[in-house]
Every structure is written in C-alpha cells, then in structure tokens.
Image: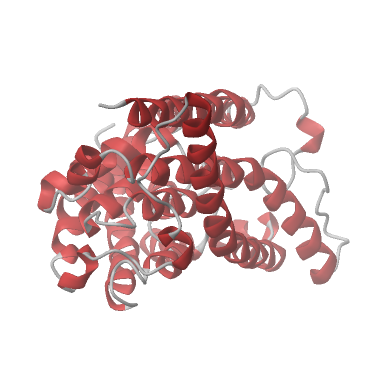
Amino acid sequence: MNKENIIKLIILISFLVLFLQGSRFRSEGKKVACSEGKCDKPHDHGQLNYHERFTVTLDDNIGMATLKGFENFWEANGTGMTFAIIIGGAGLSLLLSWKKFEQVLAFKGIKGAAVGSLFGMPLNMCANCSAVASLTMTSKSGSSETTLGIILGGALLNIIGIVTMFGLFSPAVVISRLVFSAIMILVIVPWVSKMVFKQETAPLQSQVFDKISCYFPEQSFVQTIIKSFEDWLLAVGNMAYKLIPLMLIGTLVIAIFRAFFPNELLHQITSYNSYIIIVIVAFFGTLLSVPVLFEILLGTMLYQLGFSTGAIAAVVCTVPSFGLFTLVLTKEKLGGFKVPIILTTLTFILGIGAGILAEFLTKFM
C-alpha cells in the first residue's frame, strides 16, 4: 500500500473514531438510559419516549403537533445524518485509491452480502444514513449485494442495540430480530440482486464523482493531504445534496404520523386480534424512517401501552430495515424501482413473520 492509500485509510479511520465517539456511542447511551428508565431528564420525554425540545400535548392541533414532532425528530437524527455524510465522503475517497478494497466491494452472492454487512456493522446508523454511506462507497464498481449488505448491516446488526434489547424485551423478540436479519442479509439480498441488470456493475454517472481523481501529487506530503481533502469535500457535497431533502421529507412524514396517531390512540389498537396488530405494526414500521436505535424506543413505548411480544418484534425488525426512503435512495444503483419495491415488500412480509415467530416463541419462554 503506497503512502497515498495509507493517508486515506488514516483519514477514514479518524472519521470513524470521531463518528463513534462523538455521535453514536454518546447518542445510543442516552437512548439506552431512556429505555431503561434511568434518564436524568424524564420531564423531557413525550410521544417519542426520548428527549424532546418541544413536548407534544393533547391540546396541540394537528399542525402544531406536526411542527413540534418534526423538530424533535430532526434534532434527534441530525447528528447521525451529518456523520453519515462525513463517513461516506471519506469512504469514497478511500475507494478511489485502494483497488483491492474496490475488488472486495464487487463480491457477489451470499459472500458479497455477508462482507457488506460486516462493513456496515461499525457504522451504527439508520438505514437511510447507511444507504448514503453504502451508495457512496460502492458507486464506482460495488455489487448490489455489498451495497445492500452495508445498508442492512449498519441498520440491523447494531451490537449495542441487540444487547440492549436483551435487557428490555423477551428473548423471543431478540431471537426474531436475529432471524429476520440473517434472512434479509444472507437470503433476500443475494436473491433480489439477481434481478438487477448487469449494468449495475458500471460506474454511476456523476459529474461530481468524475472530478475525484485517483491521481495524487507526488511532490509533497502536504499536497497529498490537500488533494484527499478536496476529494472528500466533493463527495460530501454530492451526498448532502441527495440526502438532506429526502430526510426533510421523511422527518415530516413521521411527524405527521405521530400527530395523527398519538399514544392514546395507539393504545386502543391493543384490543384488536394479536395477528391483525402485527400486520398493522409491520406495515407502518416498514414505511417509517427513524434515527438509529429509535426502534427500541418505539418498542418500549408499545410495551408500555400493552402491545404483545409479536407487535414489538415486528417494530424492531421493520422500522430500522429497508423502507420507503431507502427505496428512493437505492433506485439508481438497483436499476430502477422494481428491486427496491420488492425489498420493501419483503421487509413488510418478513416483519409479519418475525412477529408471528415471537408470539410462538413466547409460549416457551
């Protein structure tokens, strides 16, 4: 590995450490404390079951409740989204200069999906942020298997989240989440990737990416650093242009949903048939787009409202997985809307299956 590649790798690792220490670990620690009832600001909790700058009350009309919810969700997701752009930019810069890494990202089948999920695990990001980082790293020649593997690995294989769930929910919920994750990554991803046209291996057309060159000045160490920084800025700008509008729309949709479905209304659903509840929860869970680990907070909220183990399992499986906005983000890489729509539909179906599995396992636990 030459000096340019080493410098790029150091930059990427530095960003990753900064991301985990400054954002993920700190943010996830707060969410875990809230889920366990050990939060030092319980008065700031509300509809989200997490810190809120603005508390949504029953006296608020739909418009005010939506605005408050939008701000609360945006603030909760803002840090993670910012670091997703930083990591994605660094990843693209590294990809363009480390050819072996590019070859690894071209793996196909189960191998490609598994390797991709391993790259995604350390990111600890929601599916949307993982999608931005993944699409950036695999934009030149990465396979659809590694692309989707990174997305689902980052969203579903969050070690902190899985360990936390063991302490909060029935083991049936955690087992269902692990089974769901394994099937999505090792079975569904390789299967749907076969439906992607062969041109998915060709570089995505981007005037911005074309300006990022593998050439590095040899005259001095300083010039190498400057060129790496320029490449990173170009990638960051391109990702921010694509991600931020979608996240604004996604956050607004979630806020509207919570305004129309406050906790008091959700509690009434508990009187329905348990399997009908699982279907309803899986449907909305597939459509929602939330920050990392918020599926656990939503799960604890459902638990406190009296929902069954199956409904909780459906939430913690579908909410962080492939959904409506991940569909939009990945359509270009996957050759159109067909494969993303299939993935979203399978997320919903497998979410129902995870809920039913949890209901079954609960009888023996």
Seen at 71% across and 46% down, the residue is: 75
Position of residue 153 measured from the top left corner of the image (x, y, whole percent): 32, 42
Residue lying farthest to the front in this orientation: 219
Seen at 66% across and 42% down, the residue is: 49
Seen at 47% across and 29% down, the residue is: 11
Question: How has the structure been colored for display?
Answer: secondary structure
Position of residue 283 measured from the top left corner of the image (x, y, whole percent): 43, 66
Q: Is 103 placed left or right of 40 in the picture?
A: left
> Looking at the rendering, in which quadrant would you find the N terminus?
top left
Q: Nearer the viewer, residue 215 or 155?
A: 215
Query: Total number of numbered labels?
Result: 0
> Looking at the rendering, in which quadrant would you find the C terminus?
top left
Residue 199 in sight? yes
As displayed, is residue 291 above or below residue 70?
above
As displayed, is residue 244 above or below residue 91?
below
As displayed, is residue 221 above or below residue 342?
above
Q: Nearer the viewer, residue 341 or 362?
A: 341
Position of residue 28 measured from the top left corner of the image (x, y, whole percent): 56, 30
Q: Is 40 placed left or right of 97 in the picture?
A: right
Residue 196 in sight? no
Q: Is 149 placed left or right of 164 in the picture?
A: left
Q: Nearer the viewer, residue 327 or 277?
A: 327
Res 163 quadrant in image:
top left
Seen at 34% across and 31% down, the residue is: 5
Position of residue 192 measured from the top left corner of the image (x, y, whole percent): 19, 65
